[in-house]
Image: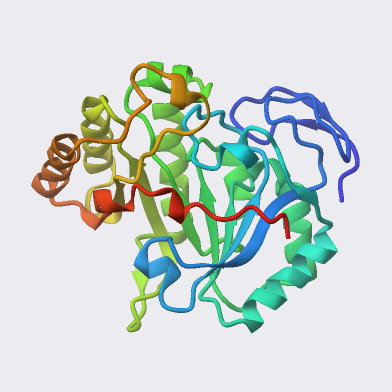
Amino acid sequence: MVILMICSICPHKCKATRELHTGEGICKAGTAPKIARISPHYWEEPCISGDKGSGAIFFSGCTMKCIYCQNYEISAENRGVEITPEKLSEEYKKLEEQGVHNIDLISATQYLPAILKSFDIYKPNIPIVYNCGGYERIETLRSLEGIVDIYLPDFKYSDNSLGEEYSGVEEYKEVAAKALAEMLRQTGKLKINDDGIAQSGVLVRHLILPGHTKNSIGVLNILKENFDSNITVSLMGQYIPHGKALNHPKLNRKLTKREYQKVLDHLLALELDGYAQELESADDSYIPNWDYK
């Protein structure tokens, strides 16, 4: 495991000093991975979770600082327990033995050197999913080529000012579009087997924010104009205010049916392939119990 690094893993390229247990960067992470939960997970898209679940590994911390994150306790507050690459590789085996459809690495970018080492120790015989916020460096993604089978990124914003205000990132639209193009170059269009389970490719998520249907329509337009039939979209209506969003004048409520339907209608008009999550999914019961095990 890397004990000391000057970090430029993510697009912030903050060149912060990171030691084993502590870090000075935007993510505040050390080089030792911290996890909040490892278990089969049944609440991803149907082609990811299937009936046996996705082998989810929730990493603590994040390279983005979304004020509305439903995993705010672990993403912003960095709560979790440290794990070594050796132990992480053992957890892959345990999940695989439980029969999950894939290994789902959730918000893992800040710990990538240790994660790459874990795959040197053991590479599972099921697909590897890279579940991220879409704000990724091309150079970092290239280190995952041949390891990641399925990319599951967000595409959050068509309005860069929202990225700055809500997630603390600059030029989100441009960075995410380039990252998505690289993901597609590596793995291609989403491929699903006869059992309805994804085997490779890219599935891009977009979470509709209350009061921001214009942003969502802009995101769908970007995906259509740049990727068209090569991309599969998961339109998400599960927004519930968490973290700092609870006190935000625009983000402190759920979506309305009218907002959701407006964006859904645009998705259908563009004839983009994918999934649409119903408003009933906006429920805290879908958030995992952070047992730090």
Q: Residue at x 32, y 83 (%)?
A: 194
Residue 90 visible in the current orientation: yes
Residue 171 visible in the current orientation: no
Q: How is the image coloured?
A: rainbow
Q: Is residue 215 above or below residue 275?
A: above
The quarter holding residue 172 reads: top left
Q: What count of labels does the image hold? A: 0
Q: Residue at x 62, y 67 (%)?
A: 39
Direction from residue 145 to residue 42 in the image, left or right: left
Q: Residue at x 14, y 42 (%)?
A: 261
| Percent of width and height locating residue 136 | 54, 38
Q: Of 263 and 158, which appears nearest the observer? A: 263
The quarter holding residue 264 reads: top left
The quarter holding residue 215 reads: top left
Q: Is residue 17 above or below residue 72?
A: above
Direction from residue 256 to residue 148 in the image, left or right: right
Q: Residue at x 47, y 46 (%)?
A: 182
